[in-house]
Image: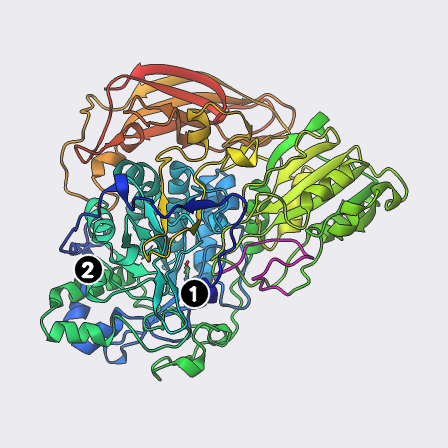
Amino acid sequence: MLSSLLPIAALVVPAFAVVQPSNTTILGQYGHVPPVYPSPNATGVGGWEGAIVKARAFVSQMTLEEKADMVTGTPGPCVGNIVPILRLGFSGLCLQDGPLSIRVADYASVFPAGVSTAATFDRDLIYQRGVAMGAEFRGKGSHVALTPVASPMGRSAYAGRNWEGFSPDPYLTGVCMAESIEGIQSVGVQATAKHWVANEQETQRNPSYEADGTLIQESVSSNVDDRTMHELYMWPFANAVKSGVSSVMCSYNRINGSYACENSKSQNGLLKGELGFQGYSMSDWGGVHSGLSSIEGGLDMNMPGGIGLYGMTWGHSYFGGNVTLAVNNGSLDLSRVDDMITRIMTPYYFLGQDVGFPEIDPSGADLNTFSPKSTWLTDDFVLNGRRSRDVRADHGELIRQIGAESTVLLKNLNNTLPLKAPTSIAVFGNDAGPDTQGFYNQVDFEYGTLSSGGGSGTGRLTYLVTPLEAINAKAQIDGALVQQFLNNTLIATSDVSTLVIPTPPDVCLVFVKTWAEEAKDRQSLDLDWDGNSVVESVAAYCANTVVVTHSSGINNLPFANHPNVTAILAAHYSGQESGNSIVDVLYGAVNPSAKLPYTIALEDDDYNGLPTTSVESSDPDAWQANFDEKLEIDYRYFDAKNMSVLYEFGFGLSYSTFELASLKISKAVESIPAVADFQPTAPGGNPALWDTLYTVNATVTNTGDVSGATVPQLYVTIPGPVGTPPKQLRGFEKVFLEAGASSEVQFSLMRRDLSYWDVILQEWAVPEGNFTFAVGFSSRDIKLSASLAVL
Ligand code: NOJ
């Protein structure tokens, strides 16, 4: 996180570089950002009507100075802090990262990452993870959890933070956002949907400065057309707002040329206007580059408040005293400030945080290197709570389960898995064993298994069950022999037959990994530490080589078709129970049911949507990322271009087999106007967008001889205008079935699911023509389909 505030001194240009030539027409086809003012006032519509009354009553008692404090973060015990107002009995707000753990804490759990969570395709598990995480934030006295992540969504395979979010598919990410938010907020903790919006690369995410603070170049601008913004990048945030998310964090990047945190179109127009968001827009840390413009542009809370933009000195703030000044000199209307605070306090009251909320755990303050006590500007943070509270409860069991149920079985030749009581096992790879650089990992360490990526999205482990440890434990019960080889260089450069005794082992388990972190995009899709050569070297000798990747996301897997590589498991970042989770899958205690939440292409060169990695110009405005691929990211692109892939979106094997039958499509309403009748906006946008227009049913049967779960998926072909993707995920359901059992699944299709964004009408519209409804087990394994006009 610290790195997020530092200038990017030198940019390493990777092989896949997208270089913006100096003559790039900035914005070009994207036009300009239309001004949208004033910032809409919250009304509390959608369930917060009672809470907003309390918030307004609170605001009415505040002085102007208190109001300025309330919208401006300050150094304190948490990563973000709003100062207490003791006179009004307000204890302040404690904001903590992050997406897989309460990061700045002791005795807290490290959960599976977002990408793992998405791979479960299991709504209930995603919700339960939210509840458990929320309970840990609450237990530590953190009012606001800086999670979940819908941006980056995964436009680029290389983006450094894709693992914090869920999937490049907006529908899947939208479901993950909704379930996570509802889970977190069910225990009275505010969730923050971040980073709004089109925050799809790390390179030049912040402006660059000379040492004296002179601007060199502005942040990268994500240039997105209106339709793509709605159908891809806004989509999961609409789910978040519909679920009542308390805050939305604006991103570092510019959007169509204007900084996200002062962009009136994105904040006033899209978020508060079109989506009817009733909570507050909070800045990313150091993402504010103006005072009045940001406030008028819709920003409600400046985080972390006052900070030097290119150093770590607290002090300067665009908000704080400048808010007071602007109100006093008449340039800022007090009513706008009142709305900012009303938006901040409404979810606080709605979630009951004014009554009995736990005090901040003082140990968090000690661990907080971002604003250590020496930087605090007030004595009002009184930390009387019990120190080092253990908030982990029994969450390890859920973490183990999610870890196993998010492990995607990509290959399983001759049913090599589950393992059949092997008596001789060889374990290879530097990802198998204990972490040698401590439990708060922020670097790409050589030795040790990866359970998380780095940056503000990481967690502080309290324990870590490694694959090696879990395999040894199982082998001890079975009386099996385990040999270990953890040095990748040794393995990659050796004749493996000379290492293993006796030969051959029943199975060679190879653990390989890929690191990714905030503030950096990935340089390559290879496994780290020469992992691809490690696999080749083991497979050259061992006829039963099983590969497990602990990875931030997409790898190229050049060994996928090697005949000796009998199985491949993508285990992503599975959290503190990593070893137990993988052993559960390897030995069949859990039948794998996870699905790839992205596509693995045949070749590295096949991917589009690459990050902009350098510019050939000293123009301050030179950093541009033109989202020219529009709606064609991930499977939408490979389908549109009719390209073969290695493993497609939605793919994942099981130890059982499943079939689908009896497709039924039913209209759920009498008549369907192409554009919904006007209704007053509520959180999530026009309420009619969430009305079910059709249902699709199918029967799924477990035709194998082991019980297990599978995920029927519904893809819809919308006869929309040019550029409409060939098919789009519009439903999925995880179903557990005993061997031989059947069950009927039902997918509800809402108006939004059947619409495209009409840029002329500025409305979602259901097109005329034939739709295709296709149900299958992946985006390319369609079992049933039917076509009909829906209007
Ligand atoms: C910057 C990151 O982009 C954001 O996700 C995080 O919540 C803040 N830093 C606070 O650490």
Instruction: Judge from the rendering whether residue 764 lies leftward or rightward of residue 628; answer left or right.
Output: left
Disc 1 residue type (three-letter): Pro
Residue 413 x %, y %: 70, 27
Residue 113 x %, y %: 51, 50
Relative to 542, say whether 44 is above or below.
Answer: below
The answer to whether one can see residue 486 in this image is: no
**Furthest-right residue in this view:** 502
Span highlighted in magenta in the image: 438-455
Please state which of residues 536 and 138 is positioned toward the viewer in this rendering.
Answer: 536
Instruction: Judge from the rendering whether residue 81 lies leftward or rightward of residue 509; answer left or right.
Output: left
Residue 482 covered by magenta stretch: no
- Magenta stretch prevailing secondary structure: loop
Residue 441 covered by magenta stretch: yes
Q: Secondary structure at mark 2?
A: helix
* Residue drawn at the location 68% of the way across and 53% of the way down: 466
Instruction: Judge from the rendering whether residue 601 lies leftward or rightward of residue 489; answer left or right.
Output: left
Disc 2 residue type (three-letter): Ile
Mark 2–mark 1 Cα distance, whole angstroms, equals: 40 Å
Please state which of residues 752 and 590 is positioned toward the viewer in this rendering.
Answer: 752
To which residue does mark 1 refer?
7
In the picture, residue 628 is in which quadrant? Answer: top left
Residue 682 x %, y %: 20, 45
* Residue drawn at the location 61% of the way across and 33% of the way down: 410
Please state which of residues 679 and 135 is positioned toward the viewer in this rendering.
Answer: 679
Relative to 174, say whether 55 is above or below.
Answer: below
Q: Which numbered circle lies on residue 742?
A: none
Q: Is mark 2 within 8 Å of ligand 1?
A: no
* Residue drawn at the location 60% of the way across and 30% of the way down: 653
**Of marks 2 and 1, which one's residue comes earlier in the chain?**
1
To which residue does mark 2 refer?
52
